[in-house]
Image (cartoon, coloured by chain):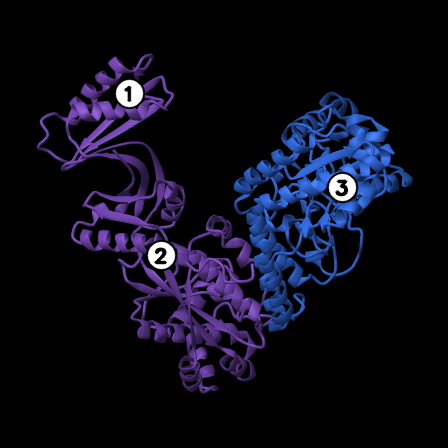
């Protein structure tokens, strides 16, 4: 009898045609996540089995709770037999340390060659338990102990508890997207929700030194690091936006500052997406939250790109967003008070219903294509990996 | 050299000193500065604080850096007293505290606070019934040392917490944990405030920590700079803080294995010293093995310590902080003036070797016999 971790897949069981891609990707993601552990993974279409050192199980489970595409995580026991007598004996052994008065057995058999039905197996093994363990009885509605038994090809599995996984799809199964990551509360949450649906993200950050500080950039790096837990690793693209922003500020009427700035950001995001083979742009916009997020603003800004822009938070209230931010431990970082390039050069009265035609006219006033080309040519790429545990290892 | 005074201070570990040096040389920016050098220092301090909070199982905003345990004790007692005096002006301390606690209490009495001293039982533990009786609605703080520096007696803080909180829910609990950190396991959820000193755990001198539960209100003792260091203003000492993080990490490694080893050394010493007729062992069954306290009934402790010095063996009298006086702790447990005035402390470390202990015991015998005949003559 071997103790092991069993994984039940999430929604992917419904994806009939792509199921192999989904399971393979999940396996790769899990292997990367557990790179520091000595483990062996095998799987079939219904379950994944992870064997390793038992003392690592607790931390392994914690890591697995950050992997999308997992419905349930189970600590179970593998028996190299399908014979009822052997299963019964081992089960009694396992139950020695458990205190319970009522129980129920739930059997699943994926091996249909087995002569008894699931219900018949449960009742056969149940009556063995009743004979061999004193003072217990069956309660099918509200048992103190639920015994799960699964009979597969050659092995059977016993387990008692299930731990909820994150659900969603394995990261990477639905392609790639570029997340506009600002350092506020919304964009990391938008990133998290997109990763959940199987999209691997790369992040894009606009800095405006000396108007924005190194601390602001460090904050974005910290946020990317939090997201990298779910995304295996994150490529963070840093665009120096100073020249574009200053040029807008000097040449364009101030009520259009934000609108034009966002249009420039979208253009850059689309070009980066093209380079990186990403299919979408993702951002943290929420309808009506600020002037640039009214529907009219969205139309005027979105107009400059052809690529789809996904706004996972479009219909979320701020409080709902904050709750998710806290759940993924991003909130404390997000609220650190450093200026980002959306908070410098803020006009007193930004236009809330910008006119697309006006945007075109104003953009004629700057040589934005050259500026964009220059910014992208010089852009910095930082690879952020969550495996690197302590950057001050030699000091601390 | 055989150093057996680890409870008064420890030699700094090589690795910790390396960190201190590296940070002093390479992280020159003031962590409060806006420029990159400042940001770099601040990031290091944040990481160090995070590491310490993880190791102690608390949150980062519950850590206050001070100059050492004496300052931590001051900030805890006076800070709580001043911030909570509207609730009451009564404070309880045990009779096994570090001398700094008593000095602070004397000061608090001069500004109108009332101090009660809780009795001990024969084994050195706080008398729970007496404690219960002394807690009043106006009691704002109970301060009880986790491990007594002279006799090594370890108090059951969890029980003490239950008693205190049952009698008076809003009464806070402080513990001087200077002699526990790195020696025995501690649980900061048993207390609301705790004092630590880094030079007791093979770190640099000049830095200590006060743990303060988020909900506890404190009045700062010194006033100065920005919000993050409101309770203890001043430019954060980047090298000392980094070295502390490392010292704490190293001190908590192998805690159990080290304790088992030291216990063996302790048993060897106690066994041998028990054979001397005129030596009384002052440890009780609740003493931790790192600290051995004895009374030489016929020999002046100072004379004995200087005589051992000849062999390059270094011992302590009661605590370094109250040398030359009566051992308040031994007096509190045994109520014997003679016994309390004749104490010597032998404190052990995982760095102590069996060979050192053998040599110590041999020289101890020689010195003892020599001085004892002088007394007898």
Figure quadrant of the C terminus of chain B: top right
Q: Secondary structure at mark 2?
A: helix
Q: Which mark is residue B367?
A: 3
Q: Is residue B98 left or right of residue B180?
A: right
- Chain hosting mark 3: B
Q: Which chain is blue?
A: B
Disc 3 versus disc 1: nearer the observer: 3
Q: Is residue A367 above or below residue B346?
A: below
Query: Which residue in the structure is indicated by mark 2?
Result: A195
In the rendered image, residue B374, in percent from the top left (x then y), is placed at: 85, 37
Q: Which chain is purple?
A: A
Q: Is residue B268 left or right of residue B95?
A: left
Query: Which residue in the structure is indicated by mark 1?
Result: A140
Can residue B234 be seen here? yes
Q: Is residue B66 above or below residue B289?
A: below
Q: Nearer the viewer, residue B214 or B57?
A: B57
Choose top left, top right, bottom left or bottom right for residue A107: top left
Residue drawn at the location 80% of the way across and 47% of the way down: B306
Q: Which mark is residue B220?
A: none
In the rendered image, residue A315, in percent from the top left (x then y), is placed at: 42, 54
Q: N-terminal of the two: label 2 or label 1?
A: 1
Q: Secondary structure at mark 3?
A: helix
Q: Is residue B366 left or right of residue A102?
A: right
Disc 3 versus disc 2: nearer the observer: 3
Query: Badge 3: how crowded within 10 Å, few (<14), some, or many (20+)?
Result: some
Asked if the residue at tag 2 contacts the one at tag 3, i.e. Cβ–Cβ closer than 8 Å, the answer is no
């Amino acid at each position: 009898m071997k103790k092991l971790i069993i994984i039940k897949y999430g929604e992917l069981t419904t994806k009939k045609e792509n199921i192999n891609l989904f399971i393979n990707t999940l396996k790769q993601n899990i292997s990367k996540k557990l790179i520091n552990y000595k483990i062996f993974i095998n799987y079939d279409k219904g379950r994944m089995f992870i064997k390793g050192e038992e003392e690592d199980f607790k931390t392994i489970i914690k890591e697995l709770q950050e992997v999308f595409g997992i419905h349930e995580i189970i600590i179970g026991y593998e028996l190299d037999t399908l014979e009822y007598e052997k299963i019964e004996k081992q089960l009694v052994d396992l139950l020695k340390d458990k205190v319970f008065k009522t129980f129920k057995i739930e059997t699943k058999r994926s091996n249909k060659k087995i002569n008894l039905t699931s219900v018949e197996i449960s009742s056969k093994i149940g009556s063995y338990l009743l004979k061999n363990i004193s003072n217990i009885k069956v309660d099918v509605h509200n048992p103190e102990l639920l015994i799960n038994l699964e009979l597969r090809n050659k092995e059977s599995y016993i387990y008692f508890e299930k731990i909820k996984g994150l659900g969603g799809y394995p990261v990477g199964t639905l392609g790639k997207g570029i997340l506009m990551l600002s350092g506020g509360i919304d964009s990391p949450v938008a990133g998290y929700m997109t990763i959940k649906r199987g999209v691997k993200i790369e992040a894009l950050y606009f800095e405006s030194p000396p108007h924005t500080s190194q601390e602001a950039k460090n904050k974005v790096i910290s946020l990317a690091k939090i997201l990298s837990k779910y995304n295996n690793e994150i490529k963070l693209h840093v665009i120096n936006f100073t020249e574009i922003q200053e040029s807008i500020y000097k040449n364009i009427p101030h009520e259009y500052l934000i609108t034009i700035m966002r249009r420039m950001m979208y253009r850059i995001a689309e070009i980066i997406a093209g380079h990186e083979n990403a299919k979408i742009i993702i951002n943290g916009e929420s309808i009506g939250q600020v002037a640039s997020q009214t529907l009219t603003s969205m139309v005027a800004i979105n107009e400059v790109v052809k690529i789809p822009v996904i706004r996972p938070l479009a219909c979320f209230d701020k409080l709902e967003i904050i709750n998710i931010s806290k759940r993924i431990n991003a909130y404390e970082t997000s609220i650190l008070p450093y200026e980002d390039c959306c908070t410098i050069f803020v006009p007193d009265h930004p236009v809330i219903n910008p006119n697309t035609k006006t945007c075109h006219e104003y953009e004629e006033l700057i040589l934005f294509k050259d500026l964009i080309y220059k910014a992208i040519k010089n852009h910095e790429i930082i690879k952020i990996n969550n495996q690197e545990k302590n950057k001050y290892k030699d000091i601390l | 050299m055989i150093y057996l005074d680890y409870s008064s201070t420890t030699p700094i570990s090589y690795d910790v000193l390396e960190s201190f040096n590296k940070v002093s040389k390479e992280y020159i920016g003031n962590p409060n500065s806006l420029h990159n050098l400042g940001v770099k220092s601040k990031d290091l301090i944040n990481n160090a604080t995070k590491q310490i909070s993880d190791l102690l199982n608390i949150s980062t905003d519950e850590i206050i850096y001070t100059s050492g345990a004496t300052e931590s004790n001051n900030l805890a007692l006076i800070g709580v007293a001043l911030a909570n005096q509207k609730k009451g002006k009564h404070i309880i301390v045990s009779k096994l505290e570090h001398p700094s606690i008593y000095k602070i209490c004397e000061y608090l009495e001069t500004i109108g606070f009332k101090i009660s001293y809780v009795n001990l039982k024969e084994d050195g533990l706080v008398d729970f019934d007496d404690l219960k009786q002394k807690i009043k609605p106006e009691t704002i703080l109970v301060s009880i040392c986790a491990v007594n520096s002279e006799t090594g007696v370890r108090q059951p803080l969890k029980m003490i917490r239950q008693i205190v909180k049952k009698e008076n829910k809003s009464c806070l609990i402080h513990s001087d944990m200077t002699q526990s950190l790195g020696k025995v396991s501690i649980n900061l959820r048993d207390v609301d405030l705790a004092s630590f000193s880094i030079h007791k755990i093979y770190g640099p001198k000049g830095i200590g920590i006060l743990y303060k539960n988020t909900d506890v209100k404190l009045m700062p003792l010194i006033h100065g700079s920005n919000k993050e260091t409101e309770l203890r203003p001043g430019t954060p000492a980047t090298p000392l803080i980094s070295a502390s993080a490392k010292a704490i990490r190293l001190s908590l490694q192998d805690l159990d294995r080290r304790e088992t080893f030291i216990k063996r050394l302790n048993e060897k010493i106690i066994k041998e010293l028990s054979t001397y007729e005129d030596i009384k062992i002052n440890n009780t069954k609740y003493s931790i093995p790192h600290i051995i306290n004895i009374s030489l009934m016929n020999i002046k402790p100072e004379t004995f310590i200087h005589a051992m010095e000849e062999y390059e063996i270094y011992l302590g009298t009661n605590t370094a902080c109250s040398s030359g006086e009566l051992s308040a702790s031994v007096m509190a447990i045994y109520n014997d003036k003679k016994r309390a005035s004749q104490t010597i402390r032998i404190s052990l470390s995982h760095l102590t070797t069996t060979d050192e202990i053998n040599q110590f015991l041999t020289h101890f015998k020689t010195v003892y016999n020599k001085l004892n005949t002088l007394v007898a003559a």
